[in-house]
Every structure is written in C-alpha cells, then in structure tokens.
Amino acid sequence: MMRFILCPLLLLLSVLAGHATHIVGGFISYRHLSGTTYRVTLTIYRDCNSQTPFDGSPGATTDAIVGLFANGSSFPDDVLNLTNPQITQILAPTNNPCLQTNSNVCVEQGVYTTTVTLPSTNTGYTLIHERCCRNGSINNIFNPGDQGAVYAAYIPPTNPFQNSSPTFNNLPPLFVCVNAPLVFDYSASDIDGDVLRYSLCTPSHGGTPTAPAPNPPAGPPYIDVPWESGYSESNMLGGSQPLRIDSVTGVITGTPPTQGQFVVGVCVSEYRNGVLISTYLRDYQLNVTQCNIPVGNIPSTNIDPVTGVGTYVIACNNTTVTFQNNSYNPPPTSTPLSFEWDFGDPTTTSDVSTLALPTYTYPDTGTYLVTLRVNKGSGSAGCGDTTFAFVKIYSSGASAFTNTNTCPLAPMTFIDQSTTPYGTVTDWLWYFGDSLNTSSTQQNPTHTYPATGSYSVTLISTNSFGCRDTLTKSVTVFEAGVSNFTYTPPCIAQQVTFTATQPAKVASYLWTLSDGSISVAANPVSIYNAPGIYPVKLVAVSQDGCIDSTTKLIEVQTPVTAVVDSATNACAGFPVQLSASGGLYYSWSPPDDLSDPLSASPVTQLVGNTTYQVMVSNDCFGDTATTTVQVRPLPSVNAGNDTTIYRDTYVWLSGSTDGITYFWNPSKWIDEPFSLTSKAQPDETIWYELFATNEWGCTAKDSVLITVIPLNILDLPTGFSPNNDGVNDVFRIARWLNVERIDEFAVYNRWGQKVFSTTNIEEGWNGTYQNQKADLGVYVWMVSGLTKDGQQITRKGNVTLLR
C-alpha cells in the first residue's frame, strides 16, 4: 500500500523532558577489519530536550562504556571508553500547511566508533552497553523512568567466521498517525551475504537511576523490560491490530489504536549455511499522534517494502471483485470523506467509482493496479491521501493425468499432466478411490489396488497463486487370470487329468508337472508309479496380461490297512466310542445304534456284548477289520435310608457296594468321605450321593436325604456344689442345640448383684464372687443369644449353690 501525501500528515506529539530520562533507542554493530580487529559502532538515540548530554561528549559525567565479554564469562576481558560521538539532530518536518508541530520535539542521534582487537581467534565475544534511563512518559512499559536499556552484539569466533554484523537500513519513523495503517521497512543489510530473519522482541533493561552508566557493564544474561498491562511482545502498541513483522522482508505493519509513546523492539537473526550466528536487537521509541488528514487504506498483504504496494485480492476464475475500504477519518468526523476509485482497467475509462465500497467486474484475467484517493473537506483547506493495491485475477488451469491400467496387487502409475496459464503447478492431492480412501501429495504417485474393478480417482492441482482445479475419472484394474485347477485323486499307475477351472478368462497356461515336465495344454495328464506327495504348479495369463499362479500338492494314494483302536470294554447303559484309522472313508457294520456309521469314530450305547466290522478305504484301495466290545455290569450301590436329625446333632451314614472304590459327595460336614460308614453333622437339609466304581471302571451311585430340623435347646442344672470334689463343681450350660452365639450368660445373687458373666457358651461359674466363696443359697441366672436361624433366644431360672 503506497501513500501520496497531498496535505501532510502529522499533528506531532511532544516528547517530555525529564532529569536523567533521555534514552530513545539504540543498537551496536561491528565490522571485521583484519585478523582479530573489528570496528565497533554504538548508535544511541536521545531526547535532545533532556538535561543529560550524550556520554563522552563535553559536559558529560561519564564516557560511553562498552564491555567486551568472552563467551560464557561474567567478567569483561576489556572495557571500551567511547567519547566524542558524531551527533545529528533529527527534526520533525515543519513546512507542511496541514501539519501542526510542537517546537520542543527533538531527537538526536549519537554515533560512537572505535576499534577492538579480540584476545583469541577461537572464542566468541559479546559487546555490551548499559544505560539508564528511558523517557518517563512511555506508555507500554511499567515505570518507564526507572527502566534502562542494554544494547549487545555477539562476535562469533574469528576462526572461522570473520563476521560483520548486519546494519539496519532505515531510521524508524519518529511519528505515526493514530488509527492509520503503519507500513515501515525495518530491514537490514549484511556485507557477508548472510541470511537475515526478523522478529519482534522485548527490549532489555540495564542500569538503574542510582547507577545509570555501569562501569563495567554487567555480563549476560539480560533482564527484559516489564510490559505495562495490556501490552506484550506480541502486541507492543495494544489494540486489535497489533504490530506484525515479515520474517523475511523485515516490513512492519499494524494500526496503532491510541496516542502516546511506545518502545518497539526488533531483532534481526543472522544465519550462515543454515547455522544461527547471532541475534541483534534495536529498540526505538515510537510516537503516536493524532493526524489531521484522512488516511486511505485498501487492506493488503505481501506489501513491497520499496513501493509500499501490496495485494488486495487474488481471485481464481472470478473477475468480479468487491472492495473493502478501511480508510481513516480523523476528527472532526462530522466532515465526511469522499472517495475516488480507479480500478486500473486499461480497456476503458469508465472503471471509476465514488462509492465507499464499490464492486467492479474485470474483462479478463490479469494484474490490475487499483488507486484510491481519499479527501476530507474541500478547496485549499482540504487534505487528502492516495493509496494503491494490486488486484490479481488468475485462471485455475486444468487438472489432467494419465495412468497405466494394471492387474490386482501390481502398482499403477499416475502421470500428472496438469497445466496452468499463470504461475506453475506446485501442489497435487490425489484420492485413489479405494475402500481406505488412500491419498498422496506426490506429483506422479503409484498405487496398488487389491482387487479387479473400476476406481474413481480424483486429482486436485494447485498453482503458485493458490488457484485449484479438480478432475475425477475412472481407472481400471484388470481381472487376473485365475489359475485354480481340479483333479481326480490319483492311484498308482493310473492316469490323472488336471483341469483348469476358468478357461474362458485365460489366454494361456503354463503347467509344471510333478516330474518337472512343462505343458501349455488346458488339461494335461500325468501318471504316478510310486506313492507319495508331488507338487503341481499352474501359471495362468489373462487376456489383459495379468498373471496368477497356484501350486497344489498331489497325494498319490497307497493301499490301506484297517486299524481298529476301540475300547474292548463298555459299561452297561453308558456310551462307548469306536475308533478306526488308515484310510479316507469308513463304513461300520452293524450300523444300528451307531451315531454315524460312516465316521471313523462313531458312538454307541450297548446293553450286551457286540462285534463290529469296519471297511476302511481311500479312492483306490480298501481293507476290513473287526472289534468286539464286551459290556460290563455296573456296581451295586446302596446309600442307606433317609434320616431326620436336629441341627447340631449328627447321623451315621452307612452305605454298601460291591465296587472296589467309593466316596460320598458332597464331602461337606462328613468326617470320612471315602469310608462307607462315616459320621455326618450337616447344618441344613442335604442330599448325599455314594459313588462306587468296580474293577472294570464302571460307575454307579445312590443317594440319601438327611433332613435337618432346627430345635432351640439351652439346658442348665438346678444346683451345683463347688467343693472341688470333681463332681458338679461348675455351673454351666449343660446342653445346647441350634445356638449361633450367646450374648451373655449371667448369674445374680438375691440382692441383684451380678456375680458372674460371660459370652463363652462353654464357660461356667465356679461359685466365687470377688475372689471369695459365694454364700450358700438360691441364685438367678439368665442367658440371651442368637439362634442359627437369626432369632433371639432368652432363657432364665434359679440355681442352688450347695457345699
């Protein structure tokens, strides 16, 4: 976007002077001279209204101090005292009839130069200058009057670099207009031809109000200046359209939203052969003021740093363009802006408009330079601005490709033939139309399809201007020649014929037979004179040239021997499995009651001894065998009579059998589950089964039902005599049934005192109280607890203590 100023721009913002607050900006650069000698240049910008002169100039209290630090060192190898700067005053323009200025606005540039010889050729060094303080009226950093600056430059080892630092090409603008687009070339030059890249970065802080010019300066690392709330490295001027810098061209763009003074930091990084050499910082104080002229603004991108003209729009296959207009109307806004558009169409003189947001249709593709003149007011008092932008209308070109039709599992090659009338085709996106939606970004890809058929392939080509075209067309994967074949299982010395299964789709055959011979017949024959397994291979070629191959192992059958491996014993009433082997086919006789008489292993259930014959065969031979199955009787088993008992009592299980082994199931609550006679004390009604096995392995069982009835019993005696004669010495619960627990068993004397208490059902009272023999007489007892059925149980009574 290039601007022609018809009535000049700026209502300048005064720079406030203050004691010892004078730093406006600066940077350090250097030039390699010879050997390890370098010329060092320190450039400082100061507010010339300040009472603080340039360091090293007449009247200054200190020289300009630059420290030389070896890489990684916190102490300088040398301190350079710079004096007699070359001072240049930078004044704001004053000859503009539309410009109102303040005579106190003044910035001076001081340039110091010296030479330095580095102590070592193999060590990198950093030049550092620290100085406080910045102008106290700066808006975007916290407590600016107490913030200083650090300017540094890194010199890489002279061996091998012999480097000279970049130098900035232009002085930043001292003033810019609020709410007006800012476009400034912040690029640098490098005499070594190194690659330069640009970024916005936070300025560094150095020095203090009490020690404004440290001698020597502190070594790295450096402290960043603190940003004020609402400002940051990514938004140094605030607002919704922050500063941006093109990393390649160094062009800064943005729209400052408020008036004031702002510190802006720009870093340039120097690369040689892809390796970063160093990064250099220049910061500068930018003054944003209210301008009294309009600012034309066609929003653009890719702005040329030389001409200031960018591109408004790139259109693909669309010649109608609607224009945006971001022009700025300064106060008083009651006076409207007028617009004069020239759309740059060379085929007509009517390509103009006075609308704020016009639309224009161009006759053809091409590049057009659009002009917008913005006016405010009229006559000699009027002020205006002119801006330019390119409109670029391109054709998308045409996507095209060819391909090789192939067979399944063979790579298909795609050849791009896309064209474009503007620029070059730079990007390709292929979709191959398979079930996995496979894609590729190669220009000429290959793809393998798993199966025959037609597939829709899409190519999206994009040219260097971002215009796209899409083509979809069908590609064919030929059907393969299926090489499957059938044959009759061969017998020794008999001819066998091999038959291809799909002759109509096959153009040719190539057989490799078991003896190594080759045949191209559709149905070759062969004879095998010895048993064994032999390979046969068929290669089939389809009419489209697709190849398929199949190899099968041919088994030449030998005479069979019938083998019977069946159980010779069966238990009466139980299934028994017969088993034969030695062939491919089986036939049992008699077939009655067999689960499958044609199976190698049928199942039957016998009641008496039976003889079976089995025919075993393959496709060439047969043999027979017989087997006799003897049916054995089951053991006799008697589990005894069903019985009913009370819970917590027991019953004797008493069974009988002529078997040789036996056991009770389940074994729960049984003392000896492998004995015919055993004590059982079940808690609940249960069926017990007695299993028995005889000498032939036949098994039988019988069951008995034990019914368990819950009966709650708590029995205690009516008297006891604790005289240690071994008879009736302790008063306890004598018998209990169906009791899960007792909560308390207690004894009370006639005065109601508890003389004994326990929760152990087996524990009793020995006739003592407080370690003394209790008196003779009648005592009251009480028992409470819980039955195994979950019911509360309570008993009480009297007991007589005798001696």
Image (cartoon, helix red, strand yellow):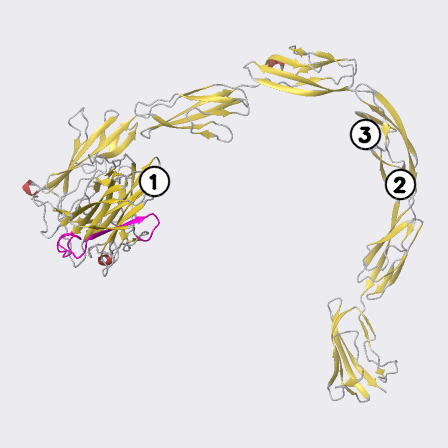
The disc, 3 or 1, on the residue closer to the chain's N-terminal end is: 1
77 sits left or right of 454 in the view: left
Which residue type does callout 1 highlight?
Leu
Q: Earlier in the sequence, mark 2 or mark 3?
A: 2
Discs 2, 3 touching: Cβ within 8 Å: no
Q: Main secondary structure of the magenta part?
A: loop
On-image quarter of the N terminus: top left
Image height check: is 568 above or below 543?
Answer: below
Q: Which mark is residue 571?
A: 2
Instruction: Measuring from the top left, give residue 425's x and y in whole percent.
Output: 35, 25
Check if residue 78 falls in the magenta segment: no
Mark nearest the camera among 1 and 2 is 1
Callout 3 crowding tier (Cα within 10 Å): few <14, some 14–19, many ≥20? many
Q: Position of residue 790 (x, y in %)?
A: 73, 67
Q: Position of residue 182 (x, y in %)?
A: 21, 43
Front-lying residue, 171 or 319: 171
Left or right relative to 745: residue 156:
left
Specify whether residue 247 is in view: no
Q: Residues within 10 Å of mark 2 (few under 14, many from 20)?
A: many
Name the amino acid, label 2.
Answer: Cys
The image quadrant where one finds the C terminus is bottom right
Across and down, in percent, residue 309 comes to 21, 34
Dot 3 corresponds to which residue? 600
Q: Secondary structure at mark 1?
A: strand
Residue linked to disc 1:
276
Q: How many other residues sit within 10 Å of disc 1, few (<14), some (14-19) or many (≥20)? A: few
Residue 486: image quadrant is top right
The boundaries of the magenta stretch are 47-75
Residue at (82%, 77%) from the top-left corner? Answer: 716
N-term mark: 1 or 2:
1
